[in-house]
Image (spheres, grey):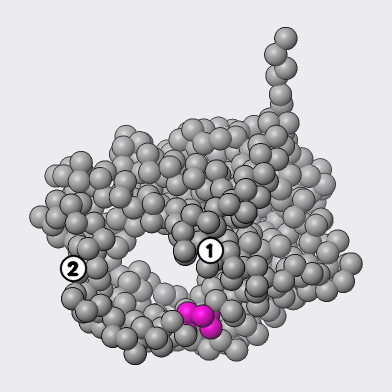
């Protein structure tokens, strides 16, 4: 007689398999390439694994277990509450400019650690200090982002620069020449400092290499403090846009890609397919270098696709990236930005009990009904409420989340996509305190 397992039992079994996959990946995966060997060695050398004291370790294990249980579709002692994403909120919280948080390593570290140290009630912290990449971006003069203090006012968040870097008639050449075309044609369109024949100047390349090492050491040092001194798990370091988003953001822009879906759909499909290994490689390297298993996969442009378009242009490659992350023992946080209510049913195609559906402005109550017993749901105190609402508004929304989404487990409460850059702290605290006071199962 075949035993029918409940959703949590399925999740627990899947989580055990995920743990074993991570162990294998750490031991064997790094042998697959020089880059992965370097990432694994860096993580082994610079990621400390000794807690400051027993209290920090106990706090860490308790929070980690609470979140793991929710991901595995179980019922923890209470609903986990996490920061989810953060960009410049620690700067706002600490009273420094976004420009300083981006450019000044000392000020960025102090601001991030101040927020983390004073808010250890969160069950997981997002590594907002990753936004200290400004010097590297300024050196390279890549026009992918407009930066505070460089292209924008000091306290304005970075902005993506979308432009047509790949012309529609160049699709066939790009697909044929792949990396060579990217290096010789696309990159020179991103920065005036990259020569199509010679590449980067050696002196500049050396300076960028030193800066990258400095950034990486800083990144790991902050993780060590938050996890092993403060006892708060950091969910992820591995982050990437899904391949369809990369095609939009890097090559065609939203206007261009929207035309391409009708004029040359096969070309779009082939380019997104070509970007799958690149996306997987980025997740692998970041995970090995930090030892953090969360993999944030951003679906920023999915809201603009119909279900039929999503099924054709996004889901096939998104599925390959998610499944590759799971095969390596990572926990995918599939982040559906904007209102993606019309796409929630696609999440049922992913394996149960090992992923998180991160809901932004979509109908999280509908997401719970669709995904209940299959995928953990995270979210979604509205960003505008965190910025312009009152603590009462926040508590009332959290009350509804706890009453309608939390029952049965498989739920993580957070802001929609995280904490906005200029959120009122009393609202952040209201979200956190409401869960601490009323979130017990």
Residue 385 image point, x, y percent: 57, 61
Task: Give the quarter of the image for residue 50.
Answer: bottom right
The residue at the point 43 percent across, 42 percent down is 320
Most extreme residue toward the right is 54
In depth, the one of 248 and 169 nearer the eye is: 169
Residue 404 image point, x, y percent: 67, 39
User: Which element type, helix, strand or loop, lies under badge 1?
Assistant: helix
The residue at the point 62 percent across, 48 percent down is 24
The residue at the point 29 percent across, 55 percent down is 247
The image shows residue 196, relative to residue 81, as above or below, that is below
The reply to whether residue 399 is visible in this rendering is: no
Magenta highlight range: 211-215
The image shows residue 261, relative to residue 219, as above or below, that is above
Q: Which residue is mark 1?
A: 37
The image shows residue 377, relative to residue 282, as above or below, that is above
The reply to whether residue 49 is visible in this rendering is: yes
Q: Which residue is mark 2?
A: 185
In magenta stretch: residue 115: no
């Amino acid at each position: 007689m075949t035993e029918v397992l409940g959703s949590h039992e399925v999740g627990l079994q899947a989580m055990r398999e995920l743990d074993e996959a991570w162990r294998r990946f750490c031991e064997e995966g790094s042998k697959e390439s020089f880059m992965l060997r370097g990432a694994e060695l860096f993580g082994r050398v610079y990621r400390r694994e000794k807690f400051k004291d027993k209290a920090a370790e106990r706090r860490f294990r308790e929070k980690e277990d609470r979140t793991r249980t929710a991901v595995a579709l179980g019922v923890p002692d209470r609903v986990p509450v996490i920061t989810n994403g953060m960009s410049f909120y620690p700067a706002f919280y600490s009273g420094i400019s976004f420009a300083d948080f981006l450019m000044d390593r000392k000020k960025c570290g102090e601001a991030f650690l101040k927020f983390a140290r004073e808010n250890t009630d969160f069950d997981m912290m997002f590594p907002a200090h990753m936004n200290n990449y400004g010097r590297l971006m300024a050196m390279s003069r890549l026009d992918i982002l407009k930066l505070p203090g460089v292209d924008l006012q000091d306290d304005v968040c970075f902005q993506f620069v979308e432009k047509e870097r790949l012309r529609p008639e160049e699709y066939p050449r790009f697909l044929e020449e792949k990396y060579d075309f990217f290096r010789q044609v696309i990159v020179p369109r991103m920065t005036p400092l990259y020569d199509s024949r010679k590449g980067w100047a050696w002196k500049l390349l050396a300076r960028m290499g030193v800066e990258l090492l400095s950034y990486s050491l800083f990144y790991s040092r902050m993780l060590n403090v938050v996890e092993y001194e403060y006892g708060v798990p950091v969910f992820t370091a591995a982050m990437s846009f899904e391949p369809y988003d990369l095609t939009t953001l890097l090559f065609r822009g939203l206007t261009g890609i929207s035309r391409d879906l009708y004029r040359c759909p096969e070309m779009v499909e082939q380019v997104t397919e070509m970007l799958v290994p690149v996306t997987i490689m980025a997740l692998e390297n970041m995970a090995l270098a930090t030892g953090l298993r969360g993999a944030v996969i951003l679906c920023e442009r999915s809201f603009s696709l119909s279900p039929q378009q999503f099924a054709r242009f996004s889901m096939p490659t998104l599925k390959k990236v998610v499944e590759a992350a799971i095969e390596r023992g990572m926990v995918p946080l599939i982040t559906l930005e904007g209102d993606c209510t019309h796409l929630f049913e696609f999440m049922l195609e992913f394996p149960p009990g090992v992923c998180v559906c991160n809901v932004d402005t979509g109908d999280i109550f509908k997401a719970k009904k669709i995904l209940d017993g299959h995928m953990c749901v995270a979210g979604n105190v509205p960003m505008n409420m965190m910025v312009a609402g009152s603590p009462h508004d926040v508590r009332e929304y959290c009350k509804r989340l706890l009453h309608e989404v939390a029952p049965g487990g498989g739920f993580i409460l957070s802001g929609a996509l995280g904490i906005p850059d200029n959120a009122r702290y009393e609202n952040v605290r209201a979200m956190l305190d409401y869960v601490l006071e009323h979130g017990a199962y």
